[in-house]
Amino acid sequence: SYVLTQPPSLSVAPGKTARITCGGNSIGTKSVHWYQQKPGQAPVMVIYYDSDRPSGIPERFSGSNSGNTATLTISRVEAGDEADYYCQVWDSSSDHSYAVFGGGTQLTVL
Amino acid sequence: QVQLVQSGAEVKKPGASVKVSCKASGYTFTTYTMHWVRQAPGQRLEWMGWINAGNGNTKYSQKFQGRLTITRDTSASTAYMELSSLRSEDTAVYYCARDKMYSSSVVNAFDIWGQGTVVTVSS
């Protein structure tokens, strides 16, 4: 089965840039989507198709995907960005196709 | 506005079944695919399956084959997730989530989420 690996935690000072990675075998050949989840709330899509932003998501959020690593970049980090972030792909490489999520990265704003 | 509203929390005994509803509003229900995703305490999100709300076709994760049934009622703009033979490991928050859809094609990404339904399995 396909595995996505994220760092469990990341700490960033306000105003700095956070880069959250998502590793997977040849992930650059797949479309990667990212979600933000705050405690006790449902996830919110922040990036789809590697780098597209849904309406209402600030331009501070951007994404890239190449080789074996996809990256979510949050510029000028704010206190309100503190949350768990999950990457997700659709894996159809085996007999069974399904959505795969990374383990999540807890972003702490110092 | 577009929203998904789920039914309330459930407490079930091992071996029982649970059925969770997800009522859609603010968009044409039958033109989107609806997914179900769950999250056990402290665990990552886990995809369960989807239903094409237009034609009723379904696809389930292999993990839940035989225990999971996803249905919909187009007249009520509501999708349902039923999980049977419950065990303690099924204790989780269950979410419905709308597919992003692009040019009428399924994207298999989730742009609108319900608020979640807590299902507790305990004897």
Image: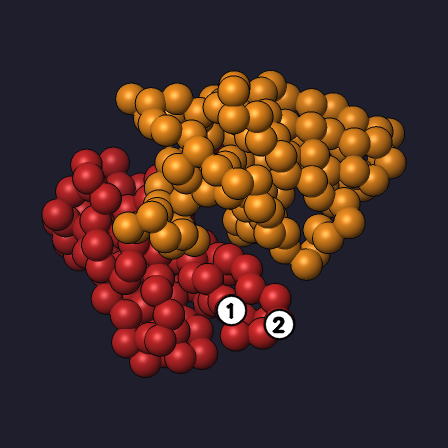
Identify the chain of the residue marked 1, using the numbered disc in the image: A
Which image quarter: residue A10? bottom left
Identify the chain of the residue marked 2, using the numbered disc in the image: A
Categorize mark 2 by other alpha carbons within 10 Å: few (<14), some (14-19), many (20+): few
Q: Which chain is orange?
A: B
Residue A43 showing in the rendered view = no
CB within 8 Å, label 1 to label 2: no
| In-image side of B116 versus B107 (left or right) | right
Query: x and y percent of residue B119 in the render?
Result: 67, 30
Query: x and y percent of residue A45 in the render?
Result: 33, 44
The residue singled out by tag 2 in the image is A95
Q: Is mark 1 on a helix, strand or loop?
A: loop
Image point (72%, 38%), residue name: B83
Query: x and y percent of residue A74 in the render?
Result: 20, 53
Specify the amino acid type for callout 1: Ser
| In-image side of A39 versus B62 (left or right) | left
Query: x and y percent of residue A67 in the render?
Result: 32, 80
Tell which of B59 and B117 is nearer to you: B59
Image quarter hosting the C terminus of chain B:
top right
Specify the amino acid type for callout 2: Asp
| In-image side of B90 versus A45 (left or right) | right
Image point (33%, 75%), residue name: A28
Q: Up-down: is A65 above or below A84?
A: below
Categorize mark 1 by other alpha carbons within 10 Å: few (<14), some (14-19), many (20+): few
Tell which of A16 and A67 is nearer to you: A67
Q: What element carries label 2?
A: loop
The residue singled out by tag 1 in the image is A92
Q: Which chain is red?
A: A
